[in-house]
């Protein structure tokens, strides 16, 4: 049997979904038997590869995220919205109550941690924020969602194991879904 290629990606979110993924503990060995992890936040590949399964955490908050999720969609056979930020924009979507300029101003000019120079920073590393934070399905087709903030390790393992074995997971069982 040929191993599948698995990628995990972290867009606009807190990394809690990836922390929950790590909580599958030794069951990662079962995943590794079925798939090579070819891209994740700790694998420093510069180019997003062609993959069978992409787990994407976080919402689309910037031009960079928009470009990245569009590339992932082109290169992933199966795209899974991983956690509530990816599914609904969740906490990151709270930014939508303010204008993009207000958010930028507060974070980069008025924040106590800044040097109080009162001018807008102009650095190429700063993200170009989107007008609104959006969940993945508002900009690309999503094949499956794993809800939760974060999803439980058991749910993540179940979904991965089912897809990597060629089956579609059934999350309708209440015991699979836990929040908080």
Image (spheres, helix red, strand yellow):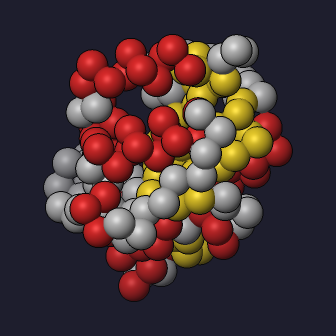
Q: Quadrant of the N terminus?
A: top right
Where is residue 168 drawn, in percent x and y? 59, 52
Quadrant for residue 97, please give it. bottom left
Does residue 93 appear anywhere in the picture? yes
Rendered view: 44 above or below 110? above
Is 113 positioned to the left or the right of 150 in the image? left
Q: In the image, is 128 to the left or to the right of 49?
A: left
Relative image position of residue 74 (x, y in whole percent): 82, 44
Residue 156: x, y in percent? 38, 44
Depth check: give the residue in front, 26 or 64: 26
User: In percent of the image, x 76 and y 42: which residue is there?
Assistant: 77
* Residue toward you, 63 or 176: 176
How many numbered marks have been drawn onto this rendered protein structure? 0
What's the residue at 42%, 20% (across, down)?
30
Q: Is residue 133 left or right of residue 91?
A: right
Residue at 35% of width from left, 49% of height from top?
155
Query: Does 54 appear above or below 107?
Result: above
Residue 22 picture quarter? top left
Location of residue 46 with respect to 138 vertically, above or below: above
Q: Residue furthest right?
A: 74
- Please state the horizontal and vertical placement of residue 35, each as a whole percent of the image: 58, 21
Q: Looking at the figure, which quarter contains the C terminus?
A: bottom left
Pick the residue in front: 120 or 66: 66
> Is the residue 113 above or below the residue 18 in the image?
below
Residue 60 visible in the picture: no
Tell me: 18 left or right of 144: left
Look at 48% across and 36% down and name the residue there.
161
């Amino acid at each position: 049997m040929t191993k599948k290629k698995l990628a995990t990606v972290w867009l606009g979110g807190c990394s809690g979904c990836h922390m929950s993924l790590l909580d599958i503990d030794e069951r990662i060995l079962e995943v590794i038997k079925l798939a090579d992890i070819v891209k994740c936040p700790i694998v420093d590949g510069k180019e997003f590869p062609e993959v069978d399964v992409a787990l994407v955490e976080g919402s689309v908050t910037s031009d960079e995220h928009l470009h990245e999720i569009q590339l992932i969609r082109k290169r992933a056979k199966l795209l899974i919205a991983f956690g509530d930020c990816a599914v609904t924009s969740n906490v990151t979507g709270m930014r939508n109550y303010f204008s993009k300029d207000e958010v930028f101003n507060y974070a980069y000019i008025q924040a106590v941690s800044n040097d109080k120079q009162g001018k807008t920073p102009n650095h190429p590393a700063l993200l170009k924020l989107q007008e609104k934070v959006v969940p993945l399905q508002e900009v690309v087709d999503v094949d499956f969602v794993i809800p939760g903030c974060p999803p439980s390790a058991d749910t993540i393992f179940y979904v991965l194991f089912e897809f990597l074995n060629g089956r579609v997971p059934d999350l309708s069982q209440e015991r699979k879904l836990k929040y908080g």
